[in-house]
Amino acid sequence: MLTKIINQANIDLFGEWLKETEKIVIVTHVSPDGDAMGSSLGLYHFLISQNKTVNIIVPNAFPEFLKWMPGAKNIMLYDKSKEIADKLIADADMICCLDFNGLKRIEGMGNAVKEAKARKVMVDHHPFPDDICSIVMSHPEISSTSELVFRLISRLGYFDEITKEGAECIYTGMMTDTGSFTYNSNSQEIYYIISQLISKGIDKDDINRNVYNTYSECRLRLMGYVLHTKMKVYPEHHAAMISLTQDELKEFSYVKGDSEGFVNIPLSIKDVKFSVFFREDTDMIKISLRSVGEFPCNKFASEFFGGGGHLNASGGEFYGTMQEAIDTFEQALDKYKPLLTTNN
Ligand code: 5GP
Ligand code: MN
């Protein structure tokens, strides 16, 4: 029923490797989001059903609103358990790299993964994958890595082995990487897959509540402050920008995840089609970029902020002061003005 997106040779080879594999490590990108977690845990639940020894190792903490995910408690944080993690990575027979396209995206873990003797597999939907895995299932046309994990398991002939827990994780990733199916979500097959996941007993309404309606009071007040005071709109550029310094974050008792989704809000203003959010971290400024339509966030992110990502959702970093970051952004906006003001 589903189009065969992943090529057969990759499916066959992965199936063969699986038979010869005992110890598997799953890794995903720094500051794991819903899709990083959903794809990793979705694959994890399947692999443990096949009696494999599986460890998910992520570079650093994931947000509070994903802690309910089945299996999340078993995830190892590399920055907290480096020694054990290094050993698991070095001893693995197979390493599955999910939802990232280059070692830079797993930060401190990069070297351990690079040096590991394990067979390496990439399942991802970011463009331009680096040459770090022998099997590369890279499909930027698919809106989430979690969807790719569903396709992979199904094509291997194991749809029946997908558990309710695994289905919940896959659904979470599909939902979060499409903004609850409001962008990158016009493929009919997404909805076919959702119906398949519902057949496993998931409650998609519950998942939506777990992810989006369990925030703290502090987050809501921070959001109010951002929208009232910190959002700058550039009508002539069809763009908007939000910035938050460490001092401001502290004032609102910020915890990781509290600013999740802020970058999307300005896109609800008529004619704004590009939105950027700067959040001051301890050693750099983290940047999130979002667009609607054809405007290439990833090109903008890579040209000015050493980053990348998807056409409509990208990220990057800036090493300098907040003011310098904003100045860079405003100059970049002028450069990109023709592109922002065409295809209206
Ligand atoms: P977010 O804004 O949610 O952190 O990231 C949005 C998208 O951009 C994600 O698909 C993520 O993989 C990508 N991304 C975020 N930060 C970076 C970065 O520093 N470098 C690159 N290459 N991609 C990033
Ligand atoms: Mn993703």
Image (cartoon, rainbow, N blue to C red):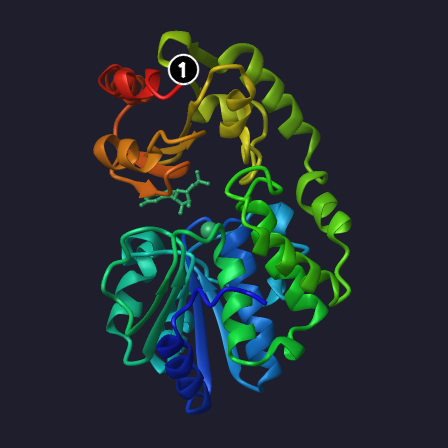
Residue found at x 64% / y 58%: 192
State the quadrant of the N terminus: bottom right
| Rendering coords of residue 241 (x, y %) | 42, 19
213 vs 34: above or below: above
Residue 92 visible to an observer of this rendering: no
- Residue found at x 45% / y 29%: 292
Q: Residue furthest bottom?
A: 20
Question: Which of 63/165 is in front?
Answer: 165
Residue at image position (41%, 8%) is: 235
Mark 1 residue element: loop
Residue at left 48%, top 50%?
A: 143
Residue 199 image point, x, y percent: 75, 66
Residue 211 falls in image quadrant? top right
Residue, far top: 236
Residue toward you, 281 or 205: 205
On the image, the x and y values in percent for residue 285 come to 35, 31
**What residue does disc 1 label?**
238
**The C terminus, quarter of image:** top left
- For disc 1, the neighbor class at 10 Å (few under 14, some 14 to 19, many from 20) is many
Q: Is residue 278 left or right of residue 319?
A: right
Residue 294 seen in the figure: yes
Q: Quadrant of residue 123?
A: bottom left
Query: In the image, is the residue at mark 1 within 8 Å of ligand 1 by its beta carbon?
Result: no
Q: Amino acid at mark 1?
A: His
| Up/down of 324 relative to 185, above or below | above
- The relative height of residue 4 versus residue 304 in the rendered view (above or below) is below
As displayed, is residue 30 above or below residue 6? above
- Along the horizontal axis of the image, is 237 left or right of 176? left
| Residue 94 % position (x, y) | 38, 79
Locate residue 341: give its quadrant: top left
Q: How many marks?
A: 1
